[in-house]
Image (tube, rainbow, N blue to C red):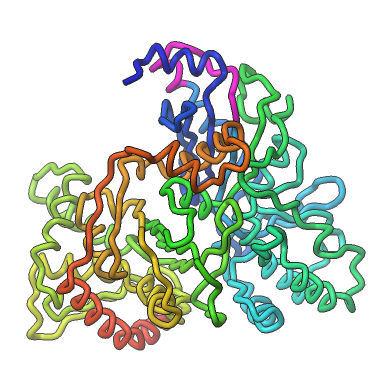
Amino acid sequence: MKNNQTYADVIKSGEAVLGIEFGSTRIKAVLTDAQGTPLASGSFQWENRLEDGLWTYRLEDIWHGLAACYGDLKRSVEQNYHVTLTKLKALGFSAMMHGYMAFDKEGRLLVPFRTWRNTNTGRAAKELTELFHFNIPLRWSVAHLYEAILDQEPHVARLDYMTTLAGYIHWKMTGERVLGIGDASGMFPIDSQTRDYDRRLMERFDTLIAPMGFSWKLKDVLPKVLPAGVPAGTLTPEGARLLDADGALEPGCPLCPPEGDAGTGMAATNSVAPGTGNVSAGTSVFAMIVLEKPLSAVYPEIDMVTTPDGAPVAMVHCNNCTSDLNAWVSLFHEFAESLGIDVEPGALYSLLYKKALEGDCDCGGMMAINYYSGEPVTGIEKGRPLFMRCPDSRFTLANFMRTHLYASLGALKTGLDLLFREESVSVHKIYGHGGLFKTPVVGQKFLAAAINAPVTVMETAGEGGAWGMALLAGYMVQRQADERLGDYLEHRIFKGQPGTTIEPDSEAVESFDRFIQSYKLALPAELAAGSWKG
């Protein structure tokens, strides 16, 4: 067991590794040692804005949030280790995948940053999916670009570079127009054999837009693709000043390829090898299964992305998970306060989640649809949270909570069933991380039932994507020749790490299967409710 003085020496000597991730509501930084041990963290809350009908973050939001997050980390280091952070062994940035950041030749942003949350790309996504015979989701960068072309937006003629949020930050930190292969796989389809953009599909796109007469081809405006472990530039003096407003941080440290939040989630859960997978369950929920063989068909419910080292991954991304559940817990908290009972929110979540374990296998004959927003996986355009029961339903607190916990995984199971049942995809390890798993056992047990596979939660799961980004940065500077990312994580980071695994039991699996059949029957009510405006 190392003590604080040892960790202080690691930081002071410049041997610490830093990962920073821009999530949808929080920017987080995690500082680690060479073994991936978290030493300190910092964070900053931020929110997207709805401007002119599109979800965005302004450039000043990005840079203010980054400096504030790093400043919080720096204060934590000073308070806990009594040293100032001045040097880093390695650094890496990650962020929400997809979206559209477009720049002209002078590096000026052409239109406000369009985030993954925007769904105005329906026509483009549909046409490209048909052209490529490859599923192009609404949020992918190429869908945003082609939609701008279809809508005859004048800025497209002046396009010189487009990238993701992580790619943009990395560019400003290093001057390098590069992107990690996992993040790049949410911009344009990747060929896992060449570990680059799919050349055939790129040629189809260029042929499609040739009549518009643009001076650029797609390859010219996309960032260069880099797999994990490859150096991706060094921190410039200008980048160091953007990161550390106090000017104490020295430039020159190496940066690894910037990644998306899907890739950092894989790294943080040791699920980059074929036959492994992870589920991130919070406000939204997504599952990523690393494939052992290609899928036989194209599914609109399934995105094809890659691991940070380029292996193909089937991803089921659902917009809705715990938001409705959180709203009900908030209501119970308000009720307790009205009675003069002071209960800490975490304790209330734990109590209510554990109560769900006492519920009947059929949830008492009740049903919930938890959609705050539209859910492409089930074909629902507008979300309206619903709770339904029959007059003879067993309306108890335990059944109520079990219903809502099941519902939080309903859309995910619908998508994953295509992989497991239609494609016979096998998975030996699933790792869970995110808010759904903060209460021990409950979320794991219900997810294991939903996917009929064992679910493991590591003690480090709470560190999240910023920690995963630090692991990728550490891999770049510490990997041995030809050492694969999966081997590095398995043997050097996760070996001996504590965690809990819950196996599915047959009764729970059967229970969830019955629930999901009823869930699908209830979707027409959700569809009809979309026209209700309250």
Percent position (x, y) of residue 2?
A: 35, 18
Judging depth in this view, the residue of 294 and 7 nearest the camera is 294
Judging depth in this view, the residue of 38 and 127 nearest the camera is 38
Q: Quadrant of residue 321?
A: bottom left
Judging depth in this view, the residue of 433 and 272 nearest the camera is 272
Judging depth in this view, the residue of 89 and 390 nearest the camera is 89
> Residue shown at 43%/31% (left/top)?
41
Region in magenta: 75-90
Q: Is residue 398 magenta?
A: no
> Residue shown at 40%/57% (left/top)?
278
Residue 254 located left or right of residue 313: right
Is residue 72 visible in the rendered image? The answer is no
Relative height, residue 79 to residue 352 (above, below): above
Percent position (x, y) of residue 423?
A: 45, 79
Image quarter where the C terminus lies is bottom left
Is residue 67 visible in the rendered image? The answer is yes
Percent position (x, y) of residue 204?
A: 79, 76
Q: Is residue 81 magenta?
A: yes
Q: Quadrant of residue 405?
A: bottom left
